[in-house]
Each structure stands twice: as structure tokens, then as C-alpha cells.
């Protein structure tokens, strides 16, 4: 590319070229799903989390902002293999790029979660999770049917809560495997048996805590449909509070734990009556207190008092606004002054380095065969040369060639 062609190219600022890169990358790399190993995991005091995602041959920076980091279901650490979802972002101030992560799961769980999310969307489109389908639980159920493992922690917790609360309800256990092969079929059979024989006023299905794989039977499509089709109101109590299954969305009510489900269905009449009386006392007390305070406040209000009070409230605010405005104006003026000085210095540097300014002092540019000559040995007598001056140019033929060594000797004389 010749010197003339270089000058014809558009000149971009660093901000402009960075803006073009940012627009290109951020527009072309959205909705990414990337799998790799966590490296240099660094939680910040702000709640944001910074880390690298790497594989055998490459590494990319990632950031989890505070809201997304708070939704993590595990505590990441270096060396873990994870799958992230997010968008590529360019940080213009440093000129680097990173992935802004919206979701991160352990790589082993990623495929299961993706499958569950797809199943959830499909069943939701059918209306199985609609709020309109959900029915209220009976206020005082006399019979409770429970579909769970007869030897697991869930059934023990449920029975213990019912005994402690002395609810006097009848409990029917419908045994079913709650994990592993064939568990979903047994859960469906228990739900349908309870409905066919009308074994309860409320039906609890669930189990204790476990891994994502352990809880999968309660997310099987057959179980979700059986829950949605149940004529008995269903409480889904799967795992611990942070666990979830698709049966939670189809059930009439989700309980955070099996024990919580037992407490929900065993509320006593005396307890409800005491709660109502306590609420009434608090309500009346609150009304009396508010009425008394309102009366005292109304007595104090007069046009003069309100005007004086408003002026006292507004005056400091107006003063602060004036002070802040002056500070902002002074800061902007100083910033503009600094930028103007920088621009002037940069302009002077550019001007002093201009080839045209140098050639104006009597220097010339000599070309031979399209190349700029810097050494006399690059041409030979009889060669045609082009001499570029500050104004115009000359075409000449080399008559005599003086070597650099002879030129230095002549200059010494």
C-alpha cells in the first residue's frame, strides 16, 4: 500500500474502533452456552463474582453480577467443570472481552436441567401449571393419604408432626419407591389408587432431600400428569426447601419439606381460633393507636404551621442542590480545561511530526521503482527517480552515484 493510499483511509479514534468491536461482538454472540473448568474464582465485596472459564487450549474471562450470583444452587470453586449461559460483553475501558453469565450449573447437571426446563415449558403450554387449575385445601381434613417410601425420612417426619400436633386425622400410607428405576410408575399408581378408593381429603406426595438425579421421578411426565388429574387436592413436598420438581408446579400447593406439609394439613381448630383472636386484638390495638396519633397531628396542623414546616424541609434541600450544582459545574469546567490542554498538546505533536512541515524546510522524498530511497546504494547511474518536494515533484535520471562512505569523507573535509 502506497503512502497516498494510507492517507486516504478513514482515521478512527480508539473509542470508535472499540465501539465497532463492541457492537460486532455483543451483537453476534448472545445467548451463549459454554462448558469449561472454573479458574481464578474471585468473589468481590460488592457481591459480583469474577472468574475464568478454561479448557485445554484456551481461556475466557467471565463475570457473575450480584443478582445472578445470588441464584447459584452451589458454591463454585476452582477446578469444577461447569456450564454457563450468558452474553459476550466488551469492556471498552480496558479493551478486553468477557462473558456476562446469567446462569451457571455443574456440567453434570446441565443436561438434566436443560431436559427439565424443556419439559416444564412443554407441559406449561398445555396448561398443567395454570393457577386456575389449583384448588384450595380443605380447612379441617379428616383423612390424609401419603404417597412416599414407607422406610424413608419423609414418612417418619410426617407421622411425627401429626402425633405432636394431636390433630386426630386418619393417615393412609401408599408405599412407593421415590428414586431409581420404576419409581415414577409406583408414584403414579399410588396417586391413582388414592383417587379410585377416595383414601384422603388431601394427598401428600414427596420424599426427603437428595441429588438432582434422586428427585427425577417426581419430574417425570407421567407423575406430573397424574398430579394434575388428581381429584384429591395434592401437596407436593419433594426434598428440602431449595429443591424442586415438576410435580411442585402441577400440585395444588407446594410445601418446602414433608414436615411442613404435615403441619399445613394438621392445623387444629383451637390454634386457628387463637390466631383469629390474636389478630383481632392486634388489629383493634393498631386502630386505636393510629386514631390517637392522627388526632394529635390534626390539632397541630394550621396553614402557618404547615407553611413554616414545609419551608424548613425544603430550604436545606434547595441549598444542597445549589451547592451540588456549583460543584458539578466547577468539576466540568476543570475537566474541559484538562481535555482542551491535552488536545492542544496532541495537535502540536501531530503538527510537528507532519511530513509536509518537514518538507517545507527544504527536505525532499526520493522514490525509485515505487520505493522510497534511504540509501544511495539502492539505485544506480542511469536509473530514473522521482523527487517529491513541498510543492510539486521532479523527474530525474541519476548521473553520478556517491557512496555513503565518500559522502561522509566529503562532509568531514
Image (cartoon, grey):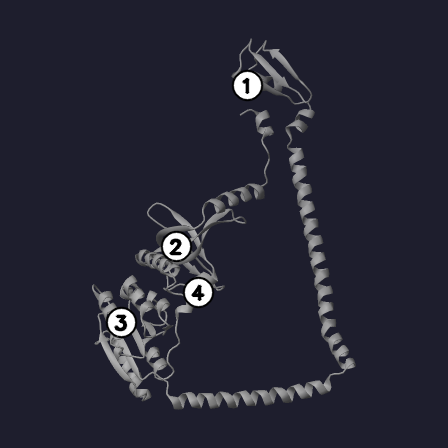
The mark that comes first in sequence, 4 or 1, is 4
Q: Which mark is residue 170?
A: none
> Is 65 on the left-hand or right-hand side of 170?
right
In this rendering, position of residue 359 left or right of residue 158: right
Circle 3 is placed at which residue position?
191
Q: Badge 2 local density, few (<14 within 10 Å), some, or many (20+)?
A: many
Which label number is shown at residue 70? 4
Q: CA distance from mark 4 to mark 1?
A: 64 Å
Residue 18 at x, y percent in the picture: 54, 43
Q: Is residue 248 visible?
A: yes
Instruction: Give the crowd class for mark 3: few <14, some 14-19, many >=20 residues within 10 Å.
Output: many
Q: Is disc 1 placed on a helix, strand or loop? A: loop
Tag in front: 3 or 4: 3
**Disc 2 target residue:** 84
Mark with earlier residue (2, 3): 2
Structural distance between the alpha carbons of marks 2 and 3: 37 Å
Q: For the image shown, how many numbered marks are present on the structure?
A: 4
- Return the x and y of residue 12 as percentages of the image width and height: 59, 38
Residue 20 drawn at (x, y percent): 54, 42
Mark 2–mark 1 Cα distance, whole angstroms, equals 54 Å
Q: Residue at 39% across / 71% down in the picture? A: 134
Crowding at mark 1 (Cα within 10 Å: few <14, some 14-19, many 20+) = few
Q: Measuring from the top left, give residue 133's x and y in whole percent.
A: 39, 69
**Circles 3 and 1: CB distance less than 8 Å?**
no
First-in-chain label (3 vs 4) = 4
Residues at discs 2 and 3 in contact (Cβ within 8 Å): no
Residue behind mark 1: 370
Is the Cβ of the residue at disc 2 closer than 8 Å to that at disc 1? no
Q: In the image, 383: left or right of 348?
A: left
Q: Mark 4 or mark 2: which comes first in sequence? A: 4
When asked about the image quadrant of residue 247, the answer is: bottom left
Amino acid at each position: 500500500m502506497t503512502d497516498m493510499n494510507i492517507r486516504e483511509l478513514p482515521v478512527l479514534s480508539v473509542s470508535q474502533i472499540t465501539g465497532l468491536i463492541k457492537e460486532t461482538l455483543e451483537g453476534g454472540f448472545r445467548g451463549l452456552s459454554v462448558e469449561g473448568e472454573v479458574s481464578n474464582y474471585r468473589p468481590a465485596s460488592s457481591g459480583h463474582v469474577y472468574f475464568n472459564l478454561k479448557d485445554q487450549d484456551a481461556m475466557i474471562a467471565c463475570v457473575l453480577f450480584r443478582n445472578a450470583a445470588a441464584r447459584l444452587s452451589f458454591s463454585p470453586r476452582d477446578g469444577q467443570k461447569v456450564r454457563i449461559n450468558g452474553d459476550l460483553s466488551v469492556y471498552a475501558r480496558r479493551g478486553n472481552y468477557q462473558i456476562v453469565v446469567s446462569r451457571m450449573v455443574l456440567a453434570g447437571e446441565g443436561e438434566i436441567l436443560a431436559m427439565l426446563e424443556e419439559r416444564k415449558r412443554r407441559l406449561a403450554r398445555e396448561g398443567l401449571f395454570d393457577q386456575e387449575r389449583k384448588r384450595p385445601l380443605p380447612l379441617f381434613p379428616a383423612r390424609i393419604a401419603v404417597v412416599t417410601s414407607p422406610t424413608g425420612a419423609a414418612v417418619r417426619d410426617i407421622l411425627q408432626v401429626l402425633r405432636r400436633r394431636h390433630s386426630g386425622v386418619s393417615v393412609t400410607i401408599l408405599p412407593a419407591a421415590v428414586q431409581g428405576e420404576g419409581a415414577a410408575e409406583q408414584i403414579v399408581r399410588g396417586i391413582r389408587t388414592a383417587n379410585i378408593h377416595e383414601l384422603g381429603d388431601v394427598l401428600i406426595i414427596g420424599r426427603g432431600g437428595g441429588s438432582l438425579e434422586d428427585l427425577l421421578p417426581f419430574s417425570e411426565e407421567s407423575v406430573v400428569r397424574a398430579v394434575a388429574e388428581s381429584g384429591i387436592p395434592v401437596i407436593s413436598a419433594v426434598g428440602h426447601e431449595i429443591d424442586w420438581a415438576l410435580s411442585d408446579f402441577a400440585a395444588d400447593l407446594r410445601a418446602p419439606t414433608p414436615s411442613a406439609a404435615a403441619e399445613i394439613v394438621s392445623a387444629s381448630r383451637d390454634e386457628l381460633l387463637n390466631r383469629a383472636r390474636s389478630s383481632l386484638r392486634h388489629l383493634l390495638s393498631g386502630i386505636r393507636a393510629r386514631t390517637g396519633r392522627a388526632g394529635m397531628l390534626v390539632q397541630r396542623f394550621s396553614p402557618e404551621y404547615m407553611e413554616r414546616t414545609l419551608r424548613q424541609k425544603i430550604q436545606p434541600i434547595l441549598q444542597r442542590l445549589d451547592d451540588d450544582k456549583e460543584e458539578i459545574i466547577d468539576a466540568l469546567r476543570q475537566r474541559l480545561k484538562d481535555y482542551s490542554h491535552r488536545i492542544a498538546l496532541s495537535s502540536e505533536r501531530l503538527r510537528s511530526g507532519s511530513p509536509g512541515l518537514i518538507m517545507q524546510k527544504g527536505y525532499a522524498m526520493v522514490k525509485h521503482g515505487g520505493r522510497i530511497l534511504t540509501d544511495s546504494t539502492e539505485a544506480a547511474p542511469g536509473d530514473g527517480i522521482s523527487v517529491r518536494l513541498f510543492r510539486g515533484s521532479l523527474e530525474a535520471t541519476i548521473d553520478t552515484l556517491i557512496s555513503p562512505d565518500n559522502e561522509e569523507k566529503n562532509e568531514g573535509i
